[in-house]
Image (tube, helix red, strand yellow):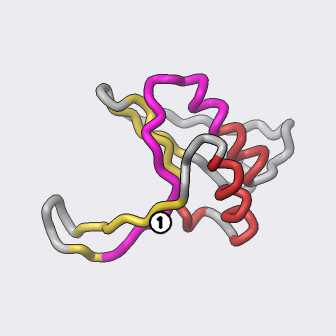
Amino acid sequence: EDPGTRKFVQFAWGVNEGFIFDLPRQTLDAIELQRAKEVLLNYDIALETWEVYDKPNGEVVGEQTGFNKDIGNSPELAKKIALDVFLKIYQVDSKTNLVVTIER
């Protein structure tokens, strides 16, 4: 997270899946969205829309749009994508001290 703007990128972790990149659409303004479409294409990550349910196997209550991809067990790739999000999509200064939070 960039503490100044509160812009973020997130990853989930699954023992069998590895890292799952997640950049929700609602965190991006129109210009950042266009940049994201271009930058993330380099990683074969495209904007997707999926249904949101009220509970597992429940009723559809809406849709979520974002950039989401299983990227495997590579912390190096996760780091590279995260840096591209901050530097090329959000265009934060390269000297910005980013905050990393790990929740388990």
Residue identified by numbered label 1: 65
Q: Quadrant of the C terminus?
A: top left
Of residues 41 and 79, which is closer to you in this image?
A: 41
Q: Helix, strand or loop at disc 1?
A: strand
The stretch drawn in magenta includes residue 75: yes
Can you tell which quarter of the image residue 13 is in? top left
In this image, 79 relative to 11: left or right? right
Type of amino acid under label 1: Thr
In this image, 73 relative to 101: left or right? left
Q: Is residue 40 shown above or below 48?
A: above
Can you tell which quarter of the image residue 37 is in? bottom right
User: Which residue lies at the image location 44% right of the left edge and 33% below the top edge?
Assistant: 19
Can you tell which quarter of the image residue 5 is in? bottom right
Q: Is residue 81 shown above or below 36?
A: above
Of residues 44 and 10, which is closer to you in this image?
A: 44
Q: Which residues are magenta?
A: 62-81
Q: Residue furthest bottom?
A: 61
Q: Quadrant of the N terminus?
A: top right
User: Which residue lies at the image location 55% right of the left edge and 64% below the top edge?
Assistant: 25
Q: Position of residue 12 (x, y in %)?
A: 42, 39
User: Which residue lies at the image location 31% right of the left edge and 67% below the top edge?
Assistant: 52
Of residues 48 and 20, which is closer to you in this image?
A: 48
The stretch drawn in magenta includes residue 71: yes
Badge 1, how many Cα within 10 Å: few under 14, some, many 20+?
A: some
Q: Residue furthest left?
A: 57
